[in-house]
Image (tube, grey):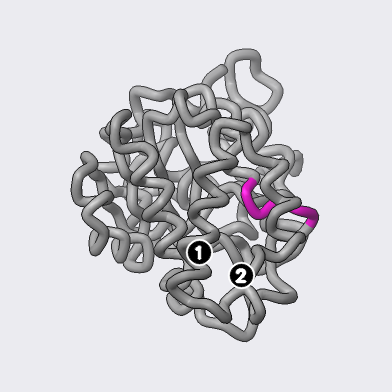
């Protein structure tokens, strides 16, 4: 049975180095769950962004970050892990505001931002509320050398060699993410197999992502695990501080 045309067309968003691997991954999914693609309708992300994360060329991958699944909103799901498409500016324009309203609405992104600020020593671990953030926003908004937009952070991730994936590449209102993640497992296994020679660090966020550890291809890679960023405890996770503080993602 051929791979549906709308999935093949979505491969155009991927770098050319990835396309044969992604196609092999889709065939592996089809072999494991023959009727899965027949059920794959009305899913996010839209606009052929399913494989947008694979714009990162394979030979530049140093980290594979795996979250849970796309944001459950069409305008937010970009095909890139936790990068909410509704977010432009990071800092609130309102007097006394901290993070922008769009960042605050995207729980995972909000907690990730707070984690970065704690890691960089700009935010106290026991004081991450609006008042403390408002002082940081006032000192950051429009300041040269400080990242202002989510797009700039995404580019910093890209430059650092991150492949920003999810355990399931789709979100459907009628299907639990853990069920879709099971169907996408052969696809991610194919992706990780293609990266074995490069030995990137696998960064796993949350229990669904940690299911990848069932795969020998994942077990063969160096790993760092954390709770999913929608948990408040993520903000003070020392493993995440150690990983991200040297990268200075909030500085240009």
- Give the alpha-carbon distance from disc 2 to disc 1, as whole Å: 8 Å
> Closer to the camera, 171 or 21?
21
Q: Is residue 14 left or right of residue 219?
A: right
Magenta stretch: dominant secondary structure: loop
Specify whether residue 20 is painted magenta: no
Q: Residue 64, percent across and down?
A: 40, 41
Residue 117, by quadrant, is top left
Specify whether residue 50 is painted magenta: yes
Disc sitting over residue 197 in the figure: none
Span colored in magenta: 47-51
Q: Residues within 10 Å of mark 1 (few under 14, many from 20)?
A: many
Looking at the image, which residue is at 44% across and 24% down? 248
Rendered-image quadrant of the N terminus = bottom right
Q: Residues within 10 Å of mark 2 (few under 14, many from 20)?
A: many
Disc sitting over residue 168 in the figure: 1
Q: Is residue 56 left or right of residue 197?
A: right
Rendered-image quadrant of the C terminus = top right
Disc sitting over residue 171 in the figure: 2
Asked if one can make out residue 238 in the rendered structure from this viewpoint, the answer is: no
Q: Are marks 2 and 1 in contact (CB under 8 Å)?
A: yes
Q: Residue 104, percent across and down?
A: 61, 55
- Relative to 15, say whether 225 is above or below: below
Extreme-bottom residue of the structure: 174
Asked if one can make out residue 251 in the rendered structure from this viewpoint, the answer is: yes
Q: Residue 209, percent across and down?
A: 36, 61
Q: Residue 57, percent across and down?
A: 54, 29
Q: For numbered disc 1, what is the local secondary structure?
A: loop
Q: For numbered disc 2, what is the local secondary structure?
A: loop
Extreme-top residue of the structure: 144
């Amino acid at each position: 049975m051929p791979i549906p045309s709308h999935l093949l067309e979505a491969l155009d968003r991927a770098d050319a180095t990835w396309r044969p691997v992604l196609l092999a991954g889709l065939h592996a999914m089809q072999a494991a769950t023959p009727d899965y693609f027949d059920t794959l309708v009305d899913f996010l992300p839209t606009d052929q962004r399913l494989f947008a994360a694979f714009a990162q060329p394979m030979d530049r991958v140093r980290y594979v970050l795996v979250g849970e699944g796309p944001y459950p909103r069409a305008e937010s799901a970009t095909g890139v892990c936790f990068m909410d498409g509704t977010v432009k500016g990071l800092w609130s324009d309102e007097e006394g505001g901290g993070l922008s309203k769009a960042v605050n609405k995207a729980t995972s992104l909000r907690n990730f931002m707070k984690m970065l600020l704690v890691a960089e020593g700009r935010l106290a671990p026991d004081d991450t509320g609006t008042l403390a953030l408002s002082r940081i926003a006032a000192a950051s908004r429009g300041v040269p050398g400080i990242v202002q937009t989510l797009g700039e952070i995404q580019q910093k991730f890209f430059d650092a060699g991150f492949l920003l994936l999810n355990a399931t590449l789709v979100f459907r209102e009628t299907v639990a993410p853990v069920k879709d993640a099971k169907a996408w497992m052969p696809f991610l296994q194919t992706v990780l197999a293609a990266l074995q020679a490069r030995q990137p660090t696998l960064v796993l966020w949350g229990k669904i992502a940690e299911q990848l550890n069932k795969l020998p291809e994942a077990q063969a890679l160096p790993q760092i695990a954390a709770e999913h960023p929608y948990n408040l405890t993520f903000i003070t996770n020392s493993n995440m501080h150690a990983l991200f503080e040297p990268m200075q993602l909030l500085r240009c």
